Image (cartoon, grey):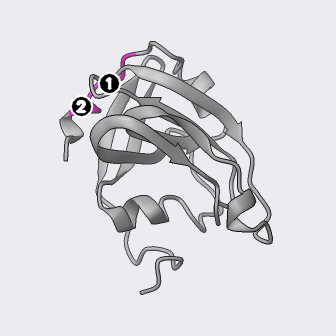
Amino acid sequence: MPIDAPPPTSPPAIVVRAPQATLHLEVARTDADRERGLMYRTSLPANTGMLFVFGSDGPVDFWMKNTLIPLDMVFVAADGTVRKVFARVPVVSPALPDGRIPLEESSGQYVIELPAGEAAADGIVPGTKLTDVTAQHP
């Protein structure tokens, strides 16, 4: 299956508690799952998204290649503390060359992608401690 194809099945999901919501997040822990992410999805219900798990806490960057819906990107430290929130990251044109797609860069062991506006609605801001994220160590 080419990496640009949608997944045949969704990755396993977990529950993460934010200050004002319970989030149901698919877990992307393999390179292939992390690269595919939420590509090609045309909708994402409230209180759902994807948790990207990395082997260590460090610099990571994300882009919106082949992502068809605007998202919030939440960068989370190894202890579950939110470091950075990129709110309402817009969709980019599929015609935009890869080298021109903007990157959202920060540091973390986890990144959570949610529907645009969800982070603010759920009380997720830098310094927020998210429950149950740290149980996802690779």
Identify the residue under disc 2: 134
The residue under the point 45% across, 63% down is: 35
> Principal SS element in the magenta part?
loop
Viewer-closest of 97 and 52: 97
The amino acid at mark 2 is Thr
How many numbered marks are there?
2
Q: Earlier in the sequence, mark 1 or mark 2?
A: 1
Q: CA distance from mark 1 to mark 2?
A: 6 Å
Please tell me whether residue 116 is drawn above or below residue 93 in the rendered image.
above
Within 10 angstroms of label 2, few (less than 14), some, or many (20 or more) residues? some
Q: Quadrant of the N terminus?
A: bottom left
Q: Secondary structure at mark 1?
A: loop
Is residue 57 a member of the stretch shown in magenta?
no
Quadrant of residue 7 in the image? bottom left
Is residue 130 a member of the stretch shown in magenta?
yes
Please tell me whether residue 118 is drawn above or below residue 99 in the rendered image.
above
Identify the residue under disc 1: 80
Q: Which residues are magenta?
A: 129-134
Quadrant of residue 97 in the image? bottom right
- Residue contact at pointers 1 and 2, CB within 8 angstroms: yes
Residue 70 placement, left or right of 2: right
User: Where's residue 18, x and y in %?
Assistant: 42, 23
